[in-house]
Amino acid sequence: MSAPFHQLAEAILAGVPATPEDALAVLRADDAELMSVVAAAGTLRRAHFGNTVKVNYLVNLKSGLCPENCNYCSQALGSDAPILKYSWLSKDAALQQAGAGLRGGASRVCLVSSGRGPSTRDIDKVTDMVTALKEEYPGVEVCACLGLLKDGQAERLRDAGVDAYNHNINTAESHHENIVQTHTYADRVDTVEKAKTGGLSPCSGLIAGLGETDEQLVEALFALRALDSDSIPVNFLMPFDGTPFENTWELSPTRCVKILAMARFVCPDKEIRIAGGREMHLRSLQSIALQVANSIFLGDYLTSEGQDAKADLEMIRDNGFVVLGSDEDLAQRAEPIDPAIRQRGAGTDVLPNA
């Protein structure tokens, strides 16, 4: 079966997009074929992103106390998960947190707040933070994740220097009502569209392990392709105690790798980010997953702790990758210097270089 996966990759590189049937075949590949799937998807990853890994860092600006009832979320209405709960960080505290991630190697900071969506005052706070952040770190990319957007808010964020907006569709439209009832799938799509029309790079992904079928995972990925999401975070359910999904364990490390590979086949030129739950579900296959994904979050997540940031960076280096924007990356991208033809010394009237 390995040949068809490589043939699929070659066809995609030639401009023939993957079909839902192709995606299902990847997801349902036998575990014995895992490395063939990874090798084939890896050719797409290397073709579009080389040996680079984009490192992102989350700053949770406002934690818990959310009025939405997303059943997977530890911050949601009705959750009894013993998480940190606090209102908005001050600008100085937000900059301090962001700076830690940037010094650790991140090139994108994701500013996240809980809640249904930002008020005008909330947008004011975030734009003030972003202005200060970009003054201190001029090259940083900033992604905001503040919930459902109202008209004009994306434009205000863009004008303040925000580069991207994250709002995950999370699951297939056919499964959405099973995981949240306080807003609709259409609400989420509308926010992604508002971000795009407002001049922000759309960042939208999914959560695997929510009781969805294989077909619904495929449905979600093709919806993300249709939305033209520039970056696709692939989260794996963390079944927090105190949430409706506690004790839900549907994922194995090999299935997680296949989900990431499927995302690469369906969206070959998009940033595929290994997001929440990778340490818990991929475990020792995290390095294998980097062969198909090209982006990770560094360190901790919104309400859960990730593995040590130093271990993340070591994993990237040990597997032959470089952090996007690092000195190693810039060195390998430097323009080659043609040999200079000697025009001095012997055979000329110009003094030698001696």
Image (cartoon, rainbow, N blue to C red):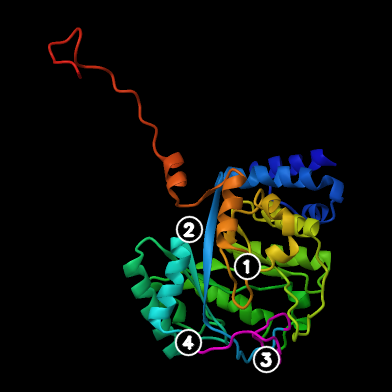
Marked residue nearer the N-terminal end (1 or 4):
4
Q: Nearer the viewer, residue 332 or 28?
A: 332
Marked residue nearer the N-terminal end (1 or 2):
2
Say which of marks 2 and 3 sits in front: 2
Quick check: marks 2 and 4 in contact, CB under 8 Å? no
Q: Nearer the viewer, residue 131 or 302?
A: 302
- Left/right placement of residue 272 relative to residue 131 reads right
Residue 279's spot in the image, x, y percent?
Answer: 69, 63
Q: Which residue is mark 4?
A: 88
Q: Which residue is mark 1?
A: 306
Q: Which residue is mark 3?
A: 77
Location of the C terminus (image quadrant): top left
Could you tell me the amino acid type at mark 2?
Gly
Say which of marks 2 and 4 sits in front: 2
Q: Which residue is mark 2?
A: 105
Q: SS at mark 1?
A: loop
**Residue drawn at point x = 57 percent, y = 46 percent:** 321
